Amino acid sequence: MKLPESVPTQLFINGEWRDASGGGQFAVEDPATSEVLAEVADATAADAMAALDAAAEAQESWARTAPRTRAELLRAGFEAITDRAEEFATVMTLEMGKPLAEARGEVAYGAEFLRWFSEEAARIHGRYSPAPDGVQRMLVTKRPVGPSLLITPWNFPLAMATRKSAPALAAGCTMVIKPAALTPLTTLLYTSVMAEAGVPAGVINVIPTRRSGATTEPLFADPRLRKLSFTGSTEVGRVLLRQASDNVLRTSMELGGNAPLLVFDDADLDVAVTGAFNAKLRNGGEACTAANRIYVQAGIAEEFTRRLAERIGSVQVGHGIDDGTQLGPVIDADARERIDGLVRDAVADGSRVLAGGSALDRPGYFYAPTVLADVPAGARVMTEEIFGPVAPVATFATEDEAVALANSTPFGLISYVFTTDLSRSLRLAERIETGMLAVNSGVISNPAAPFGGVKQSGLGREGSAEGIEEYLETVYVGIADPYAR
């Protein structure tokens, strides 16, 4: 299937589509076939600086734009994406590999950030009060942070672009977006829609590139850049934090995960199996929120694992465009090889394969949906982020052991708990080191909820009322007592 002709393939700087300054391009592949979908302009450091020039030039005007005007532009973007949902879904399926049904879900989820933050734009509040000593009046207000660099990952190409750009736009910040080289096309289409909706020149600038570090490095040295928002690996996040420290940039970092999923012996097994299936295979397992380690209380472990293996083993694998496909390819050959290495190591350590367990011999980058049982605690598949359709299962005996296992990682993005005991749910919410906790559910991401983690899973929150605060500075104004003579 061909890419829709409406998808741009150039850079977008200061309201214009343009080629890269060096004339370079890079290929974007369909991971289901390994065929080239498009050649996209490959931005250079000079292009990145031109994008920052445009963002800096537009910043004052955009910050002064009435909140209601910003809100209406966001709302127009929401409606345009919703109207063109099938087009966006097709592009995402072609460049990322997820089935069309999941891509349609991402369109709805991604568009909702525009609607949510259109409603938040006019609700940026401050306060006024007398100082405790009565000598002054205290005025506290908010203003936009300023030009922002938004670096998005490949796995949710629309939702990550909207989750970062919508609050920035609502707050009055201009931006430079650097989409992932593996999936830049959805972001370029999104940018086109927002430009058509009326977002002024210079407010959104997009610089796809296959040389991310070299292209964006000069931006960190420029004092006009005031904010970095990054979603990606913890390893890259550490590098960016060091770069951001020189100019003390505001940062939002959504980094790696190693999500535990705990199933207690009082859980409803139907709910738990469905929840584990969804938490593991949503987006083909290529999500920082994917259940990475499944721990089941010993008394129900055999039954739970058998049912999960039956469910996962029956998944229909194929090109995401095809009807009936439930699982598409992983993103590239390197990802498939890494996943296979994790599985082979787990088997060598004594794990049993109950479903899948190998790459599929077909064009593209497919890996069979896999369930492993009796996985040792130290196996790499339990300590490293899998980012693929592999579900490793181990057992625990007590609640205290389950908590210790859940917390035995430097990461803390999301955790999953299945139990019918409300008191236990509340205890675990206080004991598990996590930024988000899903209780009896395999999917809880919502634009109205704060998304983010603790420990090495990141800094800050996206979505909800907290999301816009990441793009606002707090300003205190001390005013002399108006009654003083």
Image (cartoon, rainbow, N blue to C red):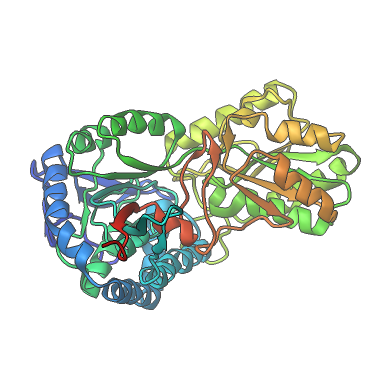
Q: Position of residue 85 (x, y in %)?
A: 40, 72
Q: Residue at x 81, y 58 (%)?
A: 270
Answer left or right for 404 relative to 333. Answer: right
Q: Position of residue 295 (x, y in %)?
A: 76, 38
The residue closer to the viewer here, 231 or 284, is: 231
Answer left or right for 386 relative to 480. Answer: right
Q: Residue at x 23, y 50 (%)?
A: 147
Q: Residue at x 52, y 55 (%)?
A: 450
Quadrant where the N terminus lies? bottom left
The residue closer to the viewer here, 277 or 419, is: 419
Q: Quadrant location of residue 12?
A: bottom left
**Above-or-below relation of 64 to 410:** below
Q: Quadrant location of residue 259?
A: top right
Answer left or right for 358 relative to 36. Answer: right
Q: Position of residue 164 (x, y in %)?
A: 37, 55
Quadrant where the C terminus lies? bottom left
Q: Quadrant location of residue 74?
A: bottom left
**Above-or-below relation of 474 to 433:** below
The residue closer to the viewer here, 336 or 276, is: 276
